[in-house]
Amino acid sequence: MHTHPEPKLLWTWTATALITAADREWLIPPGHGLWVPGGIEHSGTLLRPGEGTMITVDPDRCPITWSRPTGVSGGTLLRELITFLHSVDPEPDQRKHAEALMFGLLTPLPPHDIHVTMPTDPRVRVIAEQLVADPADPRELTAWADFTHTGLRTLSRLFQTETGLSFTHWRTQVRIRASVQLLVAGTSVDAVARQVGYRRTSAFIVAFRRVTGQTPGTYLRGQG
C-alpha cells in the first residue's frame, strides 16, 4: 500500500487489474480505467497480464474533483489520448491540451460491488460456507432446510436478517463473484456458467449483467 499527492489514471488495454483502494477492491477489465485521487492509499496486482499504463496528473491543472476512486470508461479518442500521453513526452502546451481533452472524455462508471456477507448464525453459516466452496451446488432452500433440520421459513428469515438478501439473491452474488475469477483466468463463458451452477449460458449472462452492469465477455477481452 502506498499513497502520493498527485491524482493518477490507471488504464488497461489488455490486462485485468485488481486495485485495493479506499477500503474496497476494484476489478479493472480490459478497456477500462480507475481514477485514483491524490492522497488515497492504494495497491494493485495483475490478475491477467497484458498492456496498461498509469498517467500521473499535475493537481494544479486537474479539474476533476472526485474525492474517491472512480471507475471510468471512454471511446477510441480517449484511448488514443492515453496512448499519446503514455508513449511520448509531449511539449508542455501539447500535454496541457491533450490532458484537457482527456479529462472531458472520462466517463465515470457507477460502482458494482460483488460483496458477499457471510452470516454468523450456525444454521445458515454452514449453508453459506458450502456454497462459497461450491457455487454450483444446485440445492434450493427447501433441501437446505432438510439438511440443517431447520424450518424453511426460519432459514428464509435468517438469510434476509443476516445478509440483507434473500437466499436466491445471496447465492447469485456468490456465483457471480466466483465467475469473475474464472473469467479473468481465461475460462470460456459457457464453461464458467456451468462451473458456477447455471444450466443455460443465457441465464448466467443475464445474472452477470444484472450484478456487474457488464457482460462476462468484458473480462475475456485480454485473452490471446
Image (cartoon, grey):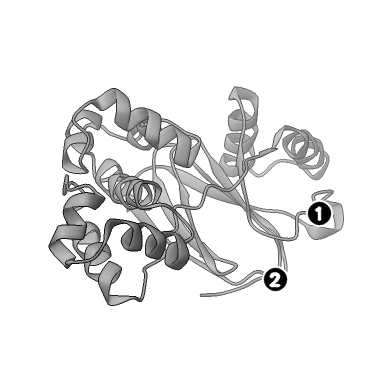
Residue at image location 51% in from the left, 75% down from the top: 1
Question: Callout 1: 10 Å neighbours few (<14), some, many (20+)?
Answer: few
Residue 142 position within the rendered picture, expressed as x and y whole percent measured from the top left: 22, 50
Given residues 94 and 170, the one toward you in this image is: 170
How many numbered marks appear?
A: 2
Q: Are marks 2 and 1 in contact (CB under 8 Å)?
A: no
Please state the horizontal and vertical placement of residue 66, each as a whole percent of the image.
76, 54
Q: Residue sitting at 70 percent across and 41 percent down? A: 90
Callout 2 environment at 10 Å: few (<14), some (14 to 19), or many (20+)? some
Q: Amino acid at mark 1?
A: Thr
Q: Residue 155: x percent and y percent?
A: 32, 61
Q: Which residue is mark 2?
A: 39
Secondary structure beneath dot 1 equals: loop
Label drawn at residue 94: none
- Mark 2 or mark 1: which comes first in sequence? 2
Residue 151 visible in the snapshot: yes
Q: Left of 174 or right of it: where is 19? A: right
Q: Residue 54 vs residue 171: left or right? A: right
Q: Is residue 189 left or right of residue 73?
A: left
Task: Decide if residue 49 is in sight here.
Answer: no
Amino acid type for the residue under numbered disc 2: Gly
> Residue at point 77% right, 57% down?
58
| Structural distance between the alpha carbons of marks 2 and 1 | 13 Å
Compared to residue 38, the image places residue 200 above or below, namely above
Residue matched to label 1: 65
* Location of residue 98 by image quarter: top right
Please state the horizontal and vertical placement of residue 115, each as a whole percent of the image. Answer: 45, 58
The quarter in which the C terminus is drawn is top left
Q: Secondary structure at mark 2?
A: loop
